[in-house]
Amino acid sequence: MGEVKVVRQATRQWLDETGVWDWSVQEKDISALPCFFDVDASFYLLGGELLITASGEDEVHLHAGDFITLPQGVACYCEVLAPLRVHHSGAALA
């Protein structure tokens, strides 16, 4: 299993190269839920606030403009602290 990767305030050029704009968009209201990703999952926050605690990793607090990749096989706890709008690839938040 790989590690959680975070890009803070990703640049437009980096996002263009990553292809984020072609990914699906998901919206999620304030909630808390356990998550397990059976494929690599990447999220770019368009709005909102998200706290992710992945097993074996430090807690990650994300805001609009941040990007995170969670590797296949990671179990985590996700807390949507403010209504969330994200581009996602690989898997969505349940």
Image (spheres, helix red, strand yellow):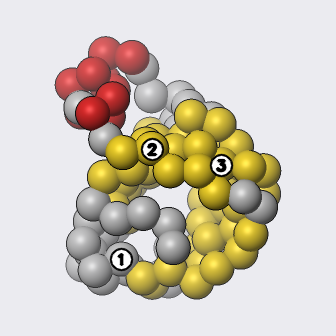
Density class for disc 3 (Cα within 10 Å; few <14, some 14-19, many ≥20) is many
* Residue on which disc 3 sits: 84
Mark nearest the camera among 3 and 1 is 3
Query: Between 53 and 45, which is closer to the camera in this rendering?
Result: 45
Tell me the SS state at disc 3.
Answer: strand
Percent x, y of residue 5: 38, 54
Determine whether label 3 and label 2 are within 8 Å by CB.
no
Query: Between 54 and 29, which is closer to the camera in this rendering?
Result: 29
How far is disc 3 from disc 1 in space, using C-alphas? 19 Å
Tell me the SS state at disc 1.
Answer: loop
Q: How many marks?
A: 3
14 w.r.t. 44: above or below: above
Percent x, y of residue 37: 36, 77
Residue 8 in sight from this viewpoint: yes
Mark nearest the camera among 3 and 2 is 2
Percent x, y of residue 38: 28, 80
* Residue on which disc 2 sits: 25
Q: Amino acid at mark 1?
A: Phe
| Residue 13 figure quarter | top left
- Of the numbered discs 3 and 1, the one sitting upstream in the chain is 1
How far is disc 3 from disc 2 in space, using C-alphas? 10 Å
| Residue 15 figure quarter | top left
79 w.r.t. 33: above or below: above
Q: Residue at x 39, y 50 (%)?
A: 88
Q: Amino acid at mark 3?
A: Leu
Query: Between 26 and 58, which is closer to the camera in this rendering?
Result: 26
Density class for disc 1 (Cα within 10 Å; few <14, some 14-19, many ≥20) is some
Question: Which residue of the protein is positioned furthest toward the top in this rendering?
Answer: 13
Q: Amino acid at mark 2?
A: Val
Point out which mark residue 37 bears. Answer: 1
Q: Residue at x 51, y 44 (%)?
A: 86
